[in-house]
Image (cartoon, helix red, strand yellow):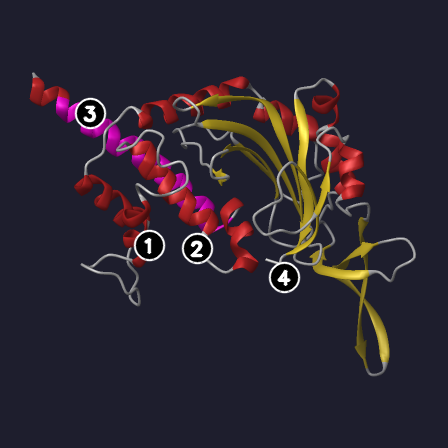
Amino acid sequence: MSHEVETMAYAGETPWHGLGVSVSNDLSPQEMLVAAGLDWEVKKKPLYFNTQSKYVKTTSKQLLARVRPGQPDEELDIVGSGWQPVQNAEGAEFFDEYVREGGMQMHTAGSLRNGTIVWFLAKIMDGFEAVPNDLIESYMLFTIPHIYGRPTDVRHTPIRVVCKNTMAQALNKGRSNQIVKVSHRNKFDPNIVKEHLGLAKARLNEYKEHATFLAGKKLDTESASEFFATVFPRTSDAKGTGGVSKQHDRAMSILETQPGAEFAMGTWWQAFNAVTFICDHEMGKDATRLDNAWYGVNANRKLKAMNLALDMAGKAASNKVLLAA
């Protein structure tokens, strides 16, 4: 993980990787920016190449550089002339009105991979219990990639407190307002992003419905095995047993022992959380785990798991109704 996290500030408990600077939970977004070591800018600079001992300026590409007072500029990436940078200060400013009004608290901020990925995470002052004492908190994650090929990303991120798992909201057909991605080909407009996201209680209420539904639906061993086999499919070089992957076997083994397993025992909620625990705390190398859990393959895996769990639990409930009739 130390190879991924460059700088970081956090409020509350020390993160699992043990890195970063501890701060109070009442910092303004601008104070969090400074505490996290993000008080620097990115700038596009002319790019030159050497031909016959002469440096010639290119026209189609530019150098994206990190600029810090009193330090040499640092190369971040090569971008096109139409690439629009988003400054770290713009990410902090996005949260200003919500923090001032008491609707959010700044939670963590930092940079990954030598400054090429910057994030701000703010806690939304609302939450719910999927079952008694199983608290789910809601967060807003703002990510600024200072690299070519990745858009600015703003999303709602529920987190299960008992195990610090980052959750996934079901992807409803025709709706994509849990995540907003803005291409660097366009100038970032925070008002459009806020309007699209809504920052609405409805997002958390919707997730509460899904979590409560899963926590109320019983799960048998056969269905659990089918669920994990679909979420963690076996690859050609996987060494599982019975034609399944090692992650399938791991999920089955921790189903009743994972952190928070005592909540909603024997339900689909328990199975879904086994997936999120493995994705966030066990899969992949330390140096890439955070990136994958928030944005990469494991973020997609958690989304797939939530949708699959809702579908399988719903079908099982419908079949029981038909049998009873």
Q: Which residue is mark 1?
A: 247
Residue contact at pointers 4 and 1, CB within 8 angstroms: no
Give residue 133's position: percent from left, percent from top: 44, 24
Q: Which residue is mark 4?
A: 3
Q: Three-letter amino acid code at disc 2?
A: Met
Q: Earlier in the sequence, mark 3 or mark 2?
A: 2
> Which numbered marker is on residue 204?
none
Q: Residues within 10 Å of mark 1 (few under 14, many from 20)?
A: many
Q: Residues within 10 Å of mark 3 (few under 14, many from 20)?
A: few
| Of the pair 140 and 258, the residue shown nearer to us | 258
Q: Main secondary structure of the magenta part?
A: helix
Q: Three-letter amino acid code at disc 4?
A: His
Residue 44 falls within the magenta-colored stretch: no
Between the residue at mark 4 and the residue at mark 3, the CA separation in whole angstroms equals: 46 Å
Q: Secondary structure at mark 1?
A: helix
Q: Earlier in the sequence, mark 2 or mark 4?
A: 4
| Of the pair 258 and 10, the residue shown nearer to us | 258
Q: Which residue is mark 3?
A: 317
